[in-house]
Amino acid sequence: MKMVKLEEEFPILNKIERGEEIVWLNPQKTSFAESMQECELTMQDVEEAEERLKRFAPFIEACFPETKNKNGLIESELIDIPYMKDTINQKYGSNLKGRLLLKQDSHLAIAGSVKARGGIYEVLKHTEDLALEQGLLTLEEDYSCLADPKFREFFSQYTIQVGSTGNLGMSIGIMGAAVGYHVIVHMSADAKQWKKDLLRSHGVTVKEYDSDYSEAVREGRRLSQLDPKSYFVDDENSKTLFLGYAVAAKRLVGQLEEKGIRIDESHPLFVYIPCGVGGAPGGITFGLKQVFQDHVHCFFVEPTQSPCMLVGMVTGLNNKISVQDMGLSGMTHADGLAVGRPSGFVGSVMKRTLSGEFTIQDGKLYDYMRDFLKSEQIFLEPSACAAFQGAVQMGKSSEIEKYLAENHLTENHLTENHLAENNLVENQPKGNHLAENHLASLMQDSVHIVWATGGSLVPEEIREEYKNTYLEPEKA
Ligand SMILES: *Cc1c(COP(=O)(O)O)cnc(C)c1O
């Protein structure tokens, strides 16, 4: 009975239930200023997280020599991907305008995925809390002392537990083991064998479940509560994880500046991020909104069979509804996104902030993966490739056209600046056809970031397997 009513109220649910790819615009999105009135987190929280990561940088550098070139900061490159833009427009019938970039969290040090932001940050925050509490450390000290055996011995009496579809477990497990904790990762059925093997090689305890992610989290939470020396990283509710992800935004400002890219009223930024439980894309979006405010437009991408954040946001029920409630399987090749129920906390923060969502069928994850390898010679894991769906739809979907019109992003503009910048004044043909010839829509100056969330640790033989995976399109 209840479901019938929901579908009447939100007709897009019919398409979602049939497993169709959709484009959804968030009707509740509002201005940045207004959206922040109801939000308990602020820029100051993000800055505190950033400071904490700086304090830990000497420790990270000491434990993980691969971070030496960034002085112990875990940060990824931002690169242009013009050939992929051509592929998107030629092969997928899109008409994406502007500059297309890739944020390579797929290649973040230590964990090889976006989880190297949130997961590692939460382990470090817990470590600092414990050490300060015990008077073992002051905020002014050089944290590289934490690599000392006496600290490792201290932390070895404590346990950290986490539920994971794979990547979160890897970030918590590797960093937790480096600090000296006993780490227990509760892995859902979707988790890949190589991720479990890699964790065990770091001395992490991996518990395997036949069930989905929510069940692995529930069991991990329960077992952790039984042990007073155990700390649970709660992906479904953690504000700490969220803030760790949010730190990405301020660093991105500098990277854009280095490339001479401006983001302002006439240079809008669009960002496409794959979404599982919502912590990573939610935290990144929160951070981006703080720095670019109304000039950034953030979209999530989820698999058609596990669009948990979408279902939660469309209905407003957040974590009170699951994809299984909609008759979807929750099964997807995108292991990082195989989540049936979203974080309620993230849903509430995104309610007035997120621009919209796209969904993608599994088969396309592999198509985009092959396209990207061919055009830019970079490997990304299937979950990460979901983000390309955003770039394709941006130049294609009629819903998006509506979004651009509503946000005054389709208007032509021909400002003095624009003319000067593009050298149009000098090159102006006699007879002044300038207005017709060079009228540029604002989208010509738009910037698009595909947020690549994982892939660099995927072993060669698994990459080969992925390259040869072809799936039939799902029938509605
Ligand atoms: C975890 C993950 C995501 C999504 O993060 P959530 O916090 O679960 O929403 C996206 N891509 C990859 C590769 C991931 O591992």
Image: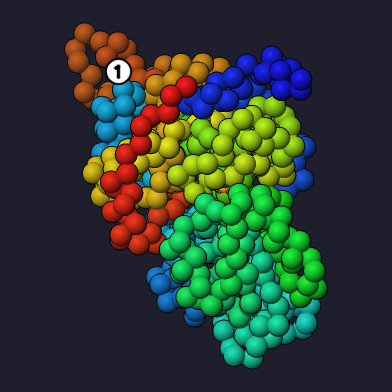
Amino acid on which the number 1 mark rests in the picture = His
Left or right? Give the position of 170 relative to 279.
left
Q: In the displayed image of the protein, which residue is found farthest to the front?
A: 210
Where in the figure is residue 247, as x and y percent of width and height? 58, 55
Residue 335, compared with residue 432, is above or below; it is: below
Q: Residue at x 63, y 16 (%)?
A: 11
So how many labels did they put on this image?
A: 1
Left of 214 or right of it: where is 415?
Answer: left
Q: Is residue 123 above or below residue 107?
A: below
**Residue 245 seen in the current view:** no
Q: Nearer the viewer, residue 162 or 82?
A: 162
Quadrant including the N terminus? top right
Q: Which residue is mark 1?
A: 438
The residue drawn where x is 61% and y is 22% is: 13
Residue 357 is situated, as x and y percent measured from the top left of the image, at 54, 31
Residue at the bottom extreme? 150
